[in-house]
Amino acid sequence: MSNNPDGKGTASPAAARPDDLRKGVLIVVSGPSGVGKSTLIDRFLREDGRSQFSISYTTRQRRVHEIDGKDYHFVDERTFESMIAKRHFLEWEKVHGNLYGTPRAEILAILQTGKDIILDIDVKGAINISGQCAAARLIFIEPPSVEELICRLSLRGEKEIETRMKRVEEEIARKGEFGYTIVNDDLEKAYGRFRKAIDDIRREDNGKNNC
Ligand code: ADP
Ligand code: 5GP
């Protein structure tokens, strides 16, 4: 399922004063479920003082270790549908049978403060955002192999491995649409590459880009 919101350019233009010129960068991290996106992002957010995680809304059931309002905003389908109707989302998708959406206003407000935003969303959602916001930068996290991905999902205690694996080939086939691809094989090495990609994005963006 796909959506086609009109979220382009809803942020107000930057004020002309030099101090206000730096706007945050929208960094979209995507890749198959279980590949290690949260692991890389959580560490980065702990070490980095100038970025913030975008908390998505979802109708999925909360996992035991997850905190409402920190990992996701957990809502029921009726609430989610009414948020779609009110154009609350920059993008939303049905993933593995559950609805997930990126809140529009929260993101634009944070970008205006000069903080970078990190999104952890599925591949279709990432490409959707890229279509609406040319300044967004996309990072694809790739597994070293499908076998290793299955192993990670099992270790995480995931029950719906088959549902999640059905999408993997389709997702990997679209990695060429991402500006950066990082294979998460050895965690330390992958994390180093992840950090470097974000450093490069920031350097290239020079703090003036915005969604
Ligand atoms: P995602 O957010 O992409 O769904 P997670 O970050 O939850 O994936 O990672 C899935 C599982 O794989 C977790 O148990 C995590 O600790 C583990 N993991 C992440 N990266 C690696 C790695 N490089 N090597 C081995 N296990 C990893
Ligand atoms: P999980 O249920 O494992 O937390 O997430 C399942 C998938 O949904 C992951 O690929 C994750 O990146 C994606 N996802 C999480 N939030 C969003 C969102 O707001 N929009 C979209 N399109 N995908 C999301």
Image: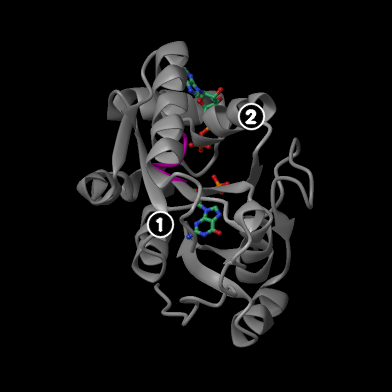
* Residue 105 visible at all: yes
Locate residue 59, reporting x and y percent: 65, 63
Is the residue indicated by label 1 positioned so its CB lies within 8 Å of ligand 2? yes
Taking the spot 45% from the left edge, 34% from the top edge, the residue there is 198
Three-letter code, disc 2: Asp
* Residue 35 visible at all: no
Q: Could you say which is closer to the camera, residue 48 or residue 144?
A: 48
Displayed quadrant of residue 76: bottom right
Q: Say which mark, if any, is on residue 150.
A: none
Image-based side of 47 in relation to 165, left or right: right
The answer to if 32 sits in the magenta stretch is yes
**Residue beneath label 1, please?**
126
Three-letter code, disc 1: Ala
95 relative to 139, above or below: below
| Type of secondary structure dominating the magenta stretch | loop
Q: Please state the extent of the stretch shown in magenta in the rendering.
A: 29-35
Locate residue 52, reporting x and y percent: 66, 44
The image's colouring method is: one colour
Locate residue 20, reporting x and y percent: 64, 57
195 relative to 186, above or below: below
Taking the spot 42% from the left edge, 61% from the top edge, the residue there is 125
Earlier residue among tags 1 and 2: 2
Image-based side of 132 in relation to 88, left or right: left
Choose mark 1 or mark 2, whichever is in front. 2
Image-based side of 145 in relation to 25, left or right: left
**Residue beneath label 2, please?**
48
User: How many badges with numbers are in the image?
Assistant: 2
Is the residue indicated by label 2 positioned so its CB lies within 8 Å of ligand 1? no
